[in-house]
Image (spheres, rainbow, N blue to C red):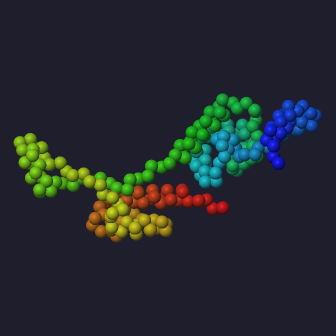
Amino acid sequence: MFDSSRAKTAGSQGGKSRSAAKKRAARNNGRAGGRQPTRTLAERLLGRKVRESERKTIAEAYGDLFEREKNQLETHFRVKALNDPLHTEQWRQANRKVPKDVQYAINRFKLAVRYHSRPLKQPKSYIVESQPCSAARRAAWEVKHRGSGLPCPPIRQKVHFEQMPHIEIFEWELRRGATLTVEDIMKIGGSRWTKRRAEGALAWLRGKSDQASDQAPEPK
């Protein structure tokens, strides 16, 4: 049966040990450049675990660094000869103390990862259009504001894409990987689909499709 207090005592005693075997192991680790890392270089730079789905984001962030900064990181962590330096455990620090210029490159890399990881703003599912005054509304306006010289203001109203004709067809086409353009929506959808409505709907549908792809579970 596991006894946490006994385990803590044993761990404390092991940490305080100054045996010959422990000194010998420390010297061997020192000659080899330290203990074998158990995490990748990307996880060392970010200070956390990295999911498989984050590889693209990390590659984009690393690409934002200057070549000088990449060279500093790869030289300090001794991964210049590797094809994939970020996702390897075969790295070693040149010095235990990280130089200021290398630390600056690490901070820049972490900021770039945070920038590329931010959630994209989902396009709106509607647009706002201005409709001219009807004859009845214009007459009521002129009675109420007689002598003011102010024209009847247009009516602003939302046009929801979900209520537009054939929107289900357009969404299905995008889900199956078809190439859909503004001209296609205007041609298939009919006269209610103006160019502005088609542009807004296409951006909204693409945003929904991308969000659904990002939220899909990773294959095991």
Q: Is residue 31 left or right of residue 67?
A: right
Above/below status of 17 relative to 46: above
Provide residue 207's location: percent of width, then percent of height: 45, 56
Provide residue 211's location: percent of width, then percent of height: 49, 56
* Residue 170 position by quadrant: bottom left
Residue closest to the eye, 33 or 175: 175
Residue 33 seen by the camera? no
Provide residue 116's location: percent of width, then percent of height: 54, 46
Residue closest to the eye, 205 or 69: 205
State how many labels appear. Answer: 0
Provide residue 124's location: percent of width, then percent of height: 38, 53
Q: Is residue 15 left or right of residue 166?
A: right
* Residue 147 position by quadrant: top left
Q: Is residue 125 left or right of residue 86?
A: left
Q: Which residue is at a point 75% across and 32% down the rendered structure image?
A: 96
Q: Which residue is at a point 43% across and 65% down the rendered structure image?
A: 171
Above/below status of 137 relative to 174: above
- Give the quarter of the figure containing the C terminus: bottom right
Residue 56 seen by the camera? yes
Q: Which residue occupies the extreme right position in the image?
A: 20
Q: Which residue is at a point 81% across and 43% down the rendered structure image?
A: 3
Q: Is residue 121 left or right of residue 166?
A: right
Q: Which residue occupies the extreme left position in the image?
A: 147
Q: Which residue is at a point 85% across and 31% down the rendered structure image?
A: 16
